[in-house]
Image (cartoon, rainbow, N blue to C red):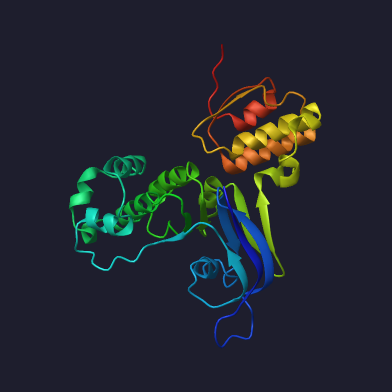
Amino acid sequence: MSLINVSNLTFAYDGSFDNIFENVSFQIDTDWKLGFTGRNGRGKTTFPHLLLGQYEYSGKISATVPFEYFPFQVANKEQPTLDVIAGISPDFQHWELMRELSLLKVSEDVLYRPFASLSNGEQTKVMLAALFLKENSFLLIDEPTNHLDMEARQLVSGYLHAKSGFILVSHDRAFLDNCVDHILSINKTNIEIKSILRKLDFSRDQFEKDISAYSGGQKKKLLIAKSLCENVHLHIWDEPLNFIDVISRMQIEELLLEHSPTILFVEHDREFCDRIATKMIHL
């Protein structure tokens, strides 16, 4: 884990009288799955390019990790797809590539076809696979759903949900909600970072304190928040609502309904089960 520090950032395009960013400061954890929201023209696409050093700005952006941007520019689309991937991520291991393609349900035969012969959706998934072959980088993913149908969006959403270490720009709210654990919200007068922890009434400072300092209910909420921040395919919860008050139970329900994590849980609260469970096993 490392931090990307943005200090007193101010930026405007040449010839514009209005700043896109004006004296803003914030930090990004490189382990986050960070969604980017804001109205058009607020800087959602601009900020990744600032991280890449493509525009001049005042203030300071510091990071100890390199940045990688999606989508990639493919100069020669007639070359085999495997060569395109090698151009994006030269040091990959074949088994790693096959793992990523399998997760995205892309067959191996596409590697030996010209990149231009792939559908737009296949090209998107191949480039995402190549992107996540780049280790120790913070990934800047700009509108990956542009050429994806509904089924492919669900597939890619699940793929990104299992990853971490990226900024995701998307206009598809459901897609964004399923993929991220933090939101960077560009408002009219400020920039705000929101996290799963804040939805459960915890600040990040509280999260980092000794857990023994909390009451039973606070401790349980903290453990739920910690579980949801883990990069896993399945959460297993045993009586998660023990010691949790009614208001906190409602907060947890809203959080789970919004982000739809995959959970196997044992719970005696009938209303919680009715709202959250999609399948029930009665023993």
At x 62% / y 61%, what residue is drawn?
5
| Quarter of the image with the C terminus in it | top right
Please, is residue 5 above or below residue 180 in the view?
A: below
Q: Nearer the viewer, residue 217 or 11?
A: 11
Where residue 73 sits in the image (x, y, percent)?
34, 66
Compare residues 91 and 235 and report the one nearer the observer. Answer: 91
- Location of residue 118 with respect to 17 vertically, above or below: above
Report which quarter residue 280 is drawn in.
top right
Most extreme residue toward the bottom, as rendered? Answer: 15
Q: Residue at x 54, y 78 (%)?
A: 56
| Residue 214 visible in rendering | no
Residue 107 occupies quadrant = top left
Q: Position of residue 115 (x, y in %)?
A: 23, 58
Q: Position of residue 166 (x, y in %)?
A: 51, 53
Does the rendering let one see residue 140?
yes
Image coordinates for residue 1, horizontal then vertical, percent: 57, 47
Residue 222 is left or right of residue 169, and the answer is right
